[in-house]
Image: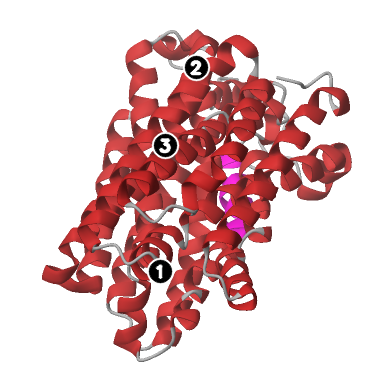
Amino acid sequence: MQNTFVIPPEQDGRQNFTTARHVVAASFLAWMLDACDFFIVLFTLDNVAKSYNVSIDTILLAPTLTLLTRPLGAFLCGRAADRYGRKPVMVGTIVFYSMIEVASAFAPTVGIFLGLRTLFGIALGGEWGVGTSLIMESVPKSWRGVASGILQAGYPAGYLLASLMFLLLPVIGWRGLFILGGSALLSALYIWIRVPESPEWLERQAGLAASGSKAKAPGLLEVMRGNAMLFLFAVVLMASFNFMSHGSQDLYPKLFLKIERGLQPHSVTLIAVLYNIAAMAGGVCFGLLSQKIGRQYSIALAALLVLPILPLWTLPHSLVWLTIGAICIQFCIQGAWGVVPAYLSELSPAAIRATFPGLAYQCGNMIAASNGLIQHRIAEMLGSGLAIPLMLVVGLAASSVLVLTMLNAKLYPDRAA
């Protein structure tokens, strides 16, 4: 009987570099636009709050709710991608979050706005895991480190794009920025036209079809029984990563630089542009480094370098030193993140590669979802502003990433990367 799943000859062995480049570019673009739509909320916190006549704390629930629903998206989209393929699920998530972004601009009440941001988290949570599996299964093994760095660089690139879009706020308002965010639909079109299905996924489905087995991804309970400790390790590690990342970004541009340090909007934008460029460079540099010294050592080095930079990052009051500190810390933080797609993908069982990394990542994100509220509350308790809370959360998170990553080789020697 002829197999339903056929591996295109030009993709066999993943040697088609043109195809690989399209996969890398498409995955980067999708993650960048997804991140941009998320950060638009953070850049417009006070504007949205004023529009609905509520407090900033109320609008801070929007990114929190988005982060809380990301694990659901990671599970649903990951399961679908493991069963039906990476490409159609990735296109679907992009279409969904683009529609939600535009709908958010027309939300008549704050309740509906928060509800839409909750739904947005499902698509946001689904896109990363599916994109990671697609890219890691579609590029040559020698590309994985740099491809991982490029993919993860999409996150600070989205932050950078949101920073630039923020300049249009006086012209089009926060609702106009959300409408612009819906242009992510173009990346779905690009993926549909130029990106093929994962050759590894096609290969596995062809094998199942040839053996007469039903092409079905393993059930969640089966996955948890076989990989419970590995999954727990990955979730705790990703929680630390997300506290490190969100702890350095969520409140930093608007509440710390603009409101607390009193910088002008153009200065805040300049700093955000520069530290996001540094973040992209860090992801690619440490991704490349991971090909030579290993994934865990590259992550550990980046996390270690974060610690001595913390005082330079928040204690100065001058524009120059704040800029230098922000550039240095984002180079290191996002440098560590640049290794994560390859690291989690290589830790994951092959049959659930779209589900495992995304679910571990987003469960960690859920744990870190209250980061903004925690930092805000610590600042109120100490009465000393955000500088200490920012350093405290990011420093503890970086230390946790360092320790957990170095423990990986001892806990899972057969899967150490």
Q: Is the magenta stretch mostly helix, strand or loop?
A: helix
Mark 1 packing: few (<14 Cα in 10 Å), some, or many (20+)? some
Q: Which of labels 1 and 3 is toward the front? A: 1
**Furthest residue to the left?**
171
Residue visible at 70% across and 39% down in the picture: 401
Q: Is residue 413 above or below residue 58?
A: above
- Specify whether residue 80 is painted magenta: yes
Determine the residue positioned at 63% across, 28% down: 299
Residue named by callout 2 = 288
First in residue order: circle 1 vs circle 3: 1
Q: In this view, does 249 lie above or below 306?
A: below
SS under mark 2:
helix
Tell me the kind of residue under disc 3.
Ala
Q: Can residue 342 be seen in this view?
A: yes
Q: Which of marks 2 and 3 is nearer the N terminus?
A: 3
- Viewer-closest of 15 and 369: 369
Disc sitting over residue 260 in the figure: 1
122 horizontally vs 281: left or right: right
Tag shown at residue 407: none
Mark 2 or mark 3: which is in front? 3
Q: Do the residues labelled 1 and 3 touch (CB within 8 Å)?
A: no
Name the amino acid, label 1.
Glu
Write down the residue under mark 3: 279
Q: Give the range drawn in magenta.
A: 70-85
The quadrant of the image that shows the C terminus is: top right
Where does residue 1 sit, x and y in percent of width and height? Answer: 60, 20
Quadrant hosting residue 90:
top left
The kind of residue tagged 2 is: Leu
Q: Where is residue 12 in the image (x, y as percent from the top left)?
A: 48, 10
Q: Is residue 50 left or right of residue 172?
A: right
Query: What colouring does the structure picture have?
Result: secondary structure
